[in-house]
Amino acid sequence: MRPKHQPNDPSPPRDLRYGCGGSEHTVHRRLFLEGSFAAGAASLASFSGLFSIPAVAEETKRAGKKCILLWLCGAPSQFEMWDPKPGTETGGPFAAINTNLPGVQVSSLMPKCATIMDKLAVVRSMSTKPSEHFQGIDALTRGDAPRPPFVRPILGSVVAEQLGQLDSPVPQFILLDPCPEGNEFKAFKAGNWAGWLGAQYGPVRAGGDYGIANLEKSAAISDLDHSDREALRSFFTKKFANDQRSEAADNYNAAYQRVKGLMSCAPLFDLNKLPVADRERYGGGAFAQHALQARHLIENGSTFVMVANGMPWDNHVFQHEMHQMLVPELDNVLFQLVSDLEDRGLLEETLVIAMGEFGRTPWLNEARGRDHYPKAWSMAMAGGGVKGGVVHGATDSQGYEVVDGKADNRNLFATIFAALGIDPHQEYELPGLPTFHRVEEDAAPIKEVLL
Amino acid sequence: MFDWLVLKALFRPVLLRWECFRCCSSVRHLLCLIALLAGGSVLTHAPAVAAEPVAARSDLTATIDRAIRSAWQQQKIEPADRCSDPVFVRRVYLDLLGRVPTMEERDTFLANASADRRSKLVDQLLTSPEQAEHFADLFDAILLGRGNQGVYDQREKHGWKKYLVNAIAENRPWNDVAAEVLLARPEAPQQDGAVWFLYEKKDKYQEIAEAVAPAFFGIRIECAQCHDHMMVDEITQADYWGLVAFFNRGKNKMTPNGPRVVESAIGGFSEFADLTGSSSPNRLQFMGKGPLDEARPKAGDKQQDKDELYIKAAVKNDPRVPKFSRREQFVKQVLVEHPLLARAMVNRLWAIMMGRGLVHPYDEIDSMHPPSHPELLDALTQDFRESGFQMRRLVRALANSEAYQLQAIRPESVNDPQWFAWYLQRPLTAEQMARSLQVVLRGEASLNRTLLASLRTQVPDVLPDNVQVDVTEALFMTNGAQLEAMIQNSRQPQSLHQRTLRQSNHPSRAKWLVDAVLGRSADQAEIDAITAYLAERDDRLEQAIDQVIWSLVSSGEFRFNH
């Protein structure tokens, strides 16, 4: 059923927070509790529960935080962003500018973020191992190197499982990526994201070519009929599951239970429903628009939104020219997003992360590109449980080595989990799984950036 | 001579740190390690112990029944009841023909009062052309794996699918089929399709080895790529690279006769390195057979490719054949006499019919995965070999067995599926769903290819270890245009829709619908629910009937075989 409210409707609906209207259950009650059907009800113990839609009520909401990951796939250059080395051999052509944090400079390609450095936590001392994209993406989205056949769940799945609102019809983990391509990232996207947590914690993929398939009901069937025939379907299946003691059939019904929620949330996935002023502020381009959509989804009950755009940051060729386009876009997006969340009082409960899978070399290659460099790189966070106005760690004068506060992917993931209020070192307790911890080997969070 | 395999093998230990670890850590392995440390006995690959002599047809069923029953007694298990005839007829049509029966087929069976009606039906279905189609679908997915539509089109175009269908329809000996597929040197046009198994792997020799092992030996060897299998002693790294070597002289070539895998008489020598970095030559060996004699060039020596190393192909336009053909050696010296060839097929057919293998998972027949009924597996394997590797004989015996004909309701006192104390419920494959929808909606057993193509992307698994239904499948069934079109277009006189409409009132429509779609009589609650739904929609009854049909074909009861 289409929600009664539309986001551009001037009067906000009562339950906008959960994105979905719901008067369907009254229809079910009318249909199934009236007439001859009630006579057969005794044969099924859970009969009345069958037609009540789980309330999308406030009390089911968990108190947990939310998270937006701006996934800068391909790996951006720290020199043109958070760790400029102006005037040195490796520094590149762009100047460094002062920020509102005394003594801290960023690249001149980031004038807007320079004005909100007091809200950001920048880590300049990331030092990781994998130097190829696929392995780097694996380590920086799952938090650790793979150990097949076990697949570690991706960050969004863990957060959705730990903090997600169980009864919300809004998907708890959403990947917005308009670009189905992206070299190694394309291959990575085809893999198993939810890992051992199970498919129900996998992302709902949307954006561009990832538009959710079959979300719109056929025009030939009315809302009422569509919803009532599902109640019938569910009734037959539940009866079968009870009669046969079939867990598989229960599981089957669970998948259908997500359908109505997803369909009712279809407008949340429609960029055109967002205010024009907001869309202009974030700027053109799919990445910026999806960052805005991420804010909208978080505001409406999603828990983790990952925004990506293929793998554009891998600038082995004409690094400076490419970054001259990409960094200002990111600068604006991050500025708008952090400012919006703060204006809406959501920054404290929403962690924003901007990073790629490693950094770029201090030197230029023959194509005037910077190559992969996992040894010393930077990333940034804001909000959630993270302290603003912190620059953690440092590299040497030309950015070859980390000289202070070295942190690897495990330290970073411990930090992210701690910021979100999730125990970083908890053991996964799933049947048949050997010992795995959320972050292995007790890797410590970066305390300096935590509130 | 530059050989990429050498390079790759040398780099293995380095790669390993980042991306390998394909093994060493599986749950089962860890559990077994614990068991071993705790003083458990080491299970070895026991040779067949005094199995029964070749059994006559009905005796094979008796052999199965005796072994299963004796395990029930030992485990003090009270199995589920025997299933009813309506349950049996749906089940056996799905398992043997890959679709539900039409109402007429079902009623014909139910009207038969003879004591042997079930085994008569099994006999009848086993000789149906549809049975060959269905098993070819299964074997296609099991042997070659799933793919996209392009992959299926190629398999069709190059005769692989037809080859499988013929092999099953003619009940050809499995050892002959296996030999043809792996030799990939067709002597007659009807064998052409056999080439596609190797050809589809596009000269990726490790992929070939990793596909040959489960398809023909029922084992997984991926773990042995970087080191001897940690927990399965009999699978060594030398076996892994040995199996690769048997195929690493092949090269795909499109000829006027179709795809061929040309084989070179030279090359393919390399070293593989273990975890300590020490390297060994890749000799021609696999799972207890070999190493075969083969002259190995000294390090640094270049081999010369010469015409005298080859003979002319028997078939015009086919590529020349090396006098010493590694593939041929593999087929003759390793494959055809290998004990696992029969054992793997027996266990697979058991899994197809019974919902899981006597060895589980069905393609890990190794010392870490002992069979639940060892003597039975030995006896069936021996029977399979001695009766000429006939698949149909075993499938028939399974369909007639007591365990196969139990209800699908797990008795409360039993949890472990390995005792086959109830019929193990299983999801329909994409092909079973497409065919069954056609039968139910149109009353005909044809295949809707558009629907099948989209179902294959939604329902990829065949014989899955566990069932995970994704929301995308639910969305597809709920809003997908394909199913909707199929339901709406099925309004010819003999369609379910029309036959329902012709019933005189809503309760009879309700009974009719449940009967037609689920193959059983409706209970009162169901009749009431459907009647109430239809009664509210007297103004749009045709649509309402479509909607009830939808709710039944998308129900869990339709989605599973039980």
Image (cartoon, coloured by chain):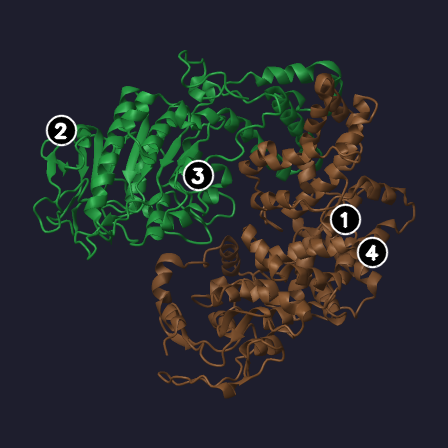
Chain colours: A green, B brown
Give the residue at x 75% y 70%.
Answer: B388
Calculate the distance from the C-alpha at mark 4 to the C-alpha at mark 2: 84 Å
- Tell me, for residue B42, which label it has, or none: none
Query: Where on the picture, by quarter, is residue A296?
Result: top left
**Dot 4 crowding, Cα within 10 Å, few <14, some 14–19, many 20+:** some
Pair 3/2: label in front:
3
- Find out whether the residues at labels 4 and 1 contact each other: C-beta distance under 8 Å: no
As drawn, B104 above or below A8: below
Indicate the chain on which mark 3 is placed: A
Q: Residues within 10 Å of mark 1 (few under 14, many from 20)?
A: many
Q: Is residue A399 visible?
A: yes
| Chain on which label 1 sits | B
Is disc 3 placed on a helix, strand or loop? helix
Q: Identify the residue under disc 2.
A: A100
State the residue in front, A436 or A148.
A148
Q: Is residue A78 above or below residue B135?
A: above
Judged from this view, the residue extending furthest toward the left is: A87
Q: Amino acid at mark 2?
A: Asn
Mark 4–mark 1 Cα distance, whole angstroms, equals 11 Å
Q: Quadrant of residue B68?
A: bottom right
Q: Are marks 3 and 1 on the same chain?
A: no
Residue at which label 1 appears: B92
User: Could you confirm whether marks 3 and 4 are on the same chain?
Assistant: no
Give the residue at mark 4.
Answer: B123
Q: Is residue A355 left or right of residue A254?
A: left
Q: Is residue B238 left or right of residue A411?
A: right
Q: CA distance from mark 3 to mark 4?
A: 50 Å
Identify the residue position indicated by label 3 in the image: A209
